[in-house]
Image (tube, rainbow, N blue to C red):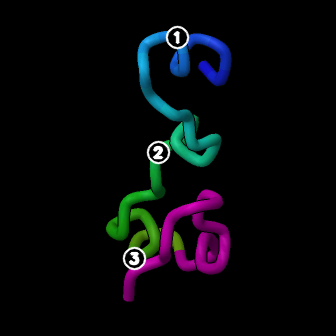
């Protein structure tokens, strides 16, 4: 992606390679707390 995106006139942010972990997953599995994917905030 980092090579193709500039050719199309954009910029690539590496953190966008992964989606954020949905908040509901943190509710169902408290062990995930503190393990949000880089670039995203863990919401309350």
Residue underneath mark 3: 27
Q: Which residues are magenta?
A: 30-44
> Measured from the top left, where is residue 12 in percent x and y?
55, 34
Count of picture labels: 3
Mark 3 → mark 1, Cα distance in angstroms: 41 Å
24 up-or-down from 34: above or below: above
Q: 26 or 34: nearer the eye? A: 34
Residue underneath mark 1: 7
Quarter holding the N terminus is: top right
Q: Is residue 1 left or right of residue 21?
A: right
Q: Is residue 21 left or right of residue 13?
A: left
> Measured from the top left, where is residue 35 in percent x and y?
66, 68
Asked if the residues shown at circle 1 and circle 2 are in contact, with their CB atoms under 8 angstroms apart, the answer is no
Of badges 2 and 3, the one in the foreground is 2
Mark 1, other Cα within 10 Å: few <14 / some 14–19 / many ≥20: few
Mark 1 → mark 2, Cα distance in angstroms: 23 Å
Mark 3, secondary structure of its residue: helix
Residue underneath mark 2: 19
In the image, what residue occupies the spot 60% across and 48% down? 15
Mark 1, secondary structure of its residue: helix
User: Is the magenta region chiefly helix, strand or loop?
Assistant: loop
- Mark positioned earlier in the residue sequence (2 or 3): 2
């Amino acid at each position: 992606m980092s090579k193709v995106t500039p050719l199309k006139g954009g910029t690539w942010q590496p953190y966008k390679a992964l989606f954020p972990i949905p908040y509901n997953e943190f509710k169902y599995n408290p062990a995930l707390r503190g393990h949000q994917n880089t670039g995203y905030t863990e919401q309350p």
